[in-house]
Structure formats: structure tokens, C-alpha cells
Image (cartoon, grey):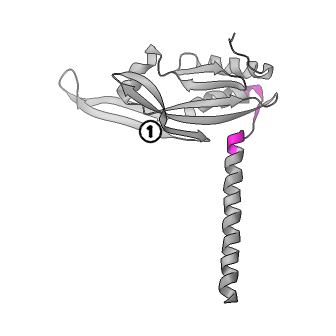
């Protein structure tokens, strides 16, 4: 089924997501912690459409199965560069990791092959499409979603910053009152 070692408790969800991704531009790839769901920008079936539409972002949804019946998803957004009509994932230009939602669209009007002014590109990208494949399969299996480690770190840093700002406000207020 897979060449890589995947946690034994990940196979059921992996198979369901792989089945849901059939005939879509997404591929499901096994990993040591679970599996990844990502746009297959190199697949000849889809890359012409992606190139024509000017796809600029590719998402990898890293799925981890910490214990049976639970899963976490970490989004990994990367910039896609098109060089001579061939996609190349750029790791240097831009990368975001965590819980990310992006929606973009490209509508281009120009003269078509018949010389008529019409819509020649109409493409919509929604980062939630890949995640929906995972969430739907997990719901069908009765899995419960938990926060991934990167989300937890982000929440901890955010809350810590908020606490520090409140403490600074109290200290500054006290200094002003004691003058």
C-alpha cells in the first residue's frame, strides 16, 4: 500500500482520504507521523490548468495521528513559481505553517481564438478544499480533531504576549500614579 512507514493507526484515515482524493488535483502521501495531502502541481492532468490560472500558492496539509480516533492537521503554505510553464515549489520565497485559510481567484478577459472578447481564465483557489477531504473522511470514521504542536506553540506565544502586555500596562500605570 505504501513505501514509507506510517503509524498503524493512520492507515484507515489515510485510505479514506486517498479514496476521496481520487480524480482530484490532490495527492495523499504517507509520512512517519501520518500522511500529507497536497496539490499535485506536477501531474500532467492538472498543471496546465494551474499554469494557465497563475496558481501562486500550494498547500500541504500535514496530518498526524497522535492516537487512535484523533487527528491533527497543520497547514504548510508555499509559494509556487512557474518557470517556462513548469511548476516549481519555492521554499525560500514564502512559507507559512499553522492553521491557514487562503482564498484567491483569477479571472482574465481577453480576445479568444475566435477573436471574441471573453473570459479566458476563471480559476478559484481555496485552501480549505484539501482540508475538507481530510475532515470529511475523519468525520465519517468518528475521529476527533485536536490541535497540532505548531498551533499549540502559536497559542502559547500569543497568550504569553497578551499577559506581558497587560503586565507592562500595569507597571506603566503604577509608575505614572506614583509620580
**Residue sitting nearer the eye, 72 or 116:** 72
Look at 65% across and 28% down and name the residue there: 134
Q: Say which residue label 1 marks.
A: 104
Q: Where is residue 98 in the image (x, y as percent from the top left)?
A: 62, 41
Q: Quadrant of residue 113?
A: top left
Look at 54% across and 32% down and name the residue there: 59
* As drawn, 155 above or below 66: below
Is 96 colored magenta in this rendering? no
Please provide the residue range marked out in magenta. 140-151
**Label 1 crowd bin: few (<14), some (14–19), many (20+), radius 10 Å:** few
Look at 23% across and 31% down and name the residue there: 110
* As drawn, 68 above or below 1: below
| Residue that sits furthest to the top in the current view | 1
Q: Where is residue 148 in the image (x, y as percent from the top left)?
A: 71, 39
Q: Is residue 31 among what the camera can see?
A: yes
Q: In screen coordinates, is 169 left or right of 82?
A: right
Q: Position of residue 67 (x, y in %)?
A: 82, 30
Amino acid at each position: 500500500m505504501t513505501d514509507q512507514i506510517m503509524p498503524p493507526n493512520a492507515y484507515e484515515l489515510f485510505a479514506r482520504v486517498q479514496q476521496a482524493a481520487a480524480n482530484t488535483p490532490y495527492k495523499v502521501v504517507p509520512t512517519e507521523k501520518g500522511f500529507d495531502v497536497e496539490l499535485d502541481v506536477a501531474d500532467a492532468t492538472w498543471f496546465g490548468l494551474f499554469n494557465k490560472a497563475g496558481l501562486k500558492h500550494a498547500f500541504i496539509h500535514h496530518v498526524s495521528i497522535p492516537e487512535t480516533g484523533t487527528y491533527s492537521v497543520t497547514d504548510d503554505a508555499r509559494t509556487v513559481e512557474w518557470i517556462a510553464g513548469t511548476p516549481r515549489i519555492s521554499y525560500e520565497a514564502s512559507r507559512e505553517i499553522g492553521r491557514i485559510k487562503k482564498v484567491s481567484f483569477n479571472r482574465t478577459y481577453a480576445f479568444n481564438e475566435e477573436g471574441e472578447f471573453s473570459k479566458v481564465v476563471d480559476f478559484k483557489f481555496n485552501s480549505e478544499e484539501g482540508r475538507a477531504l481530510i475532515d470529511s473522511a475523519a468525520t465519517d470514521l468518528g475521529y476527533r480533531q485536536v490541535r497540532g504542536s505548531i498551533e499549540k506553540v502559536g497559542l502559547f506565544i500569543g497568550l504569553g504576549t497578551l499577559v506581558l502586555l497587560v503586565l507592562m500596562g500595569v507597571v506603566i500605570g503604577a509608575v505614572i500614579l506614583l509620580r
